[in-house]
Image (tube, grey):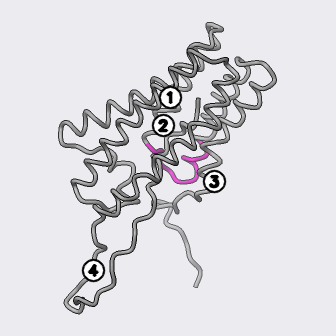
Amino acid sequence: MIRTEDPAHPAPLNPLLKLALEMGPLVIFFFVNQRGDIFAATALFTVATVIALAIHYALVRKLPVMPLVSAVVVVVFGGLTLLLQDELFIKLKPTIVNTLFGIVLLVGLYFGKPLLTVVLDSVFKLTDEGWNKLTFRWGLFFFFLAAINEVVWRTQTTDFWVSFKVFGIMPITIIFALAQTPLLMRHELPEDGAGGDAASDDAAPDQPAAPPAPPSRNDASP
């Protein structure tokens, strides 16, 4: 049987392609900066970010909130960097983005809205308590990333800062995400229809939850 895709519901983006779209602009930024021109690197990084976002939309017909917000900030701060010929603005971009995400998550949680469900609800099925705890942890983690960025760009060279953004932030984020696995296992909801009347004391134990994917935000970006 020939399978056809519903144009209104395109297939999810291939994980490797998704990673390439998120990391591609950053890799360009790194290699161009290695040639000694932070402003050329910023210009190409800004253009590559917009192109990556456009490709993402063309493939799945929707834009994730966090990558969209990150791209807008890249365009604004990248533009200021080029217009004023001041690298301060591109260095502030991660601080602004991560602080914004942290505020949104924690304020939403304060009002009883664990907004992380908007990003990860299709990946994980958790209890309300689980979503609240996971949202709180990610909110604090975004503030942590903002603080690290401030320390690095204020105390180190531009080349070190760029290298840290490429080879430091992503591993830190992955380690943090993996560290949330016990929380996911404790608060994972049973799959629909997993039990039924036929399910008894001999039912197989729950399978461990997959490690939590870091929220996609295109900010492995600087």
Q: Is residue 189 above or below residue 29?
A: below
- Measuring 71% from the left and 24% from the top, which residue is drawn there? 41
What residue type is disc 1 on?
Answer: Val
Q: Are marks 3 and 4 in contact (CB under 8 Å)?
A: no
Q: Is residue 183 above or below residue 108?
A: below
Q: Quadrant of residue 46?
A: top right
Q: CA distance from mark 2 to mark 1?
A: 6 Å
Q: Which residue position is annotated with label 4?
A: 193
Q: CA distance from mark 4 to mark 1?
A: 42 Å
Asked whether residue 58 is drawn in magenta, I would say: yes
Q: Which mark is residue 23?
A: none
Secondary element under disc 3, as helix, strand or loop, is helix
Q: Is residue 41 above or below residue 67?
A: above
- Measuring 25% from the left and 48% from the top, which residue is drawn there? 132
Q: Which residue position is annotated with label 3?
A: 17
Q: Quadrant of residue 140?
A: top left
What residue type is disc 2 on?
Answer: Leu
Left or right: where 162 falls relative to 173: right
Q: Are marks 2 and 1 in contact (CB under 8 Å)?
A: yes
Image x and y of residue 123, in percent: 41, 60
Q: Which mark is residue 72?
A: 1
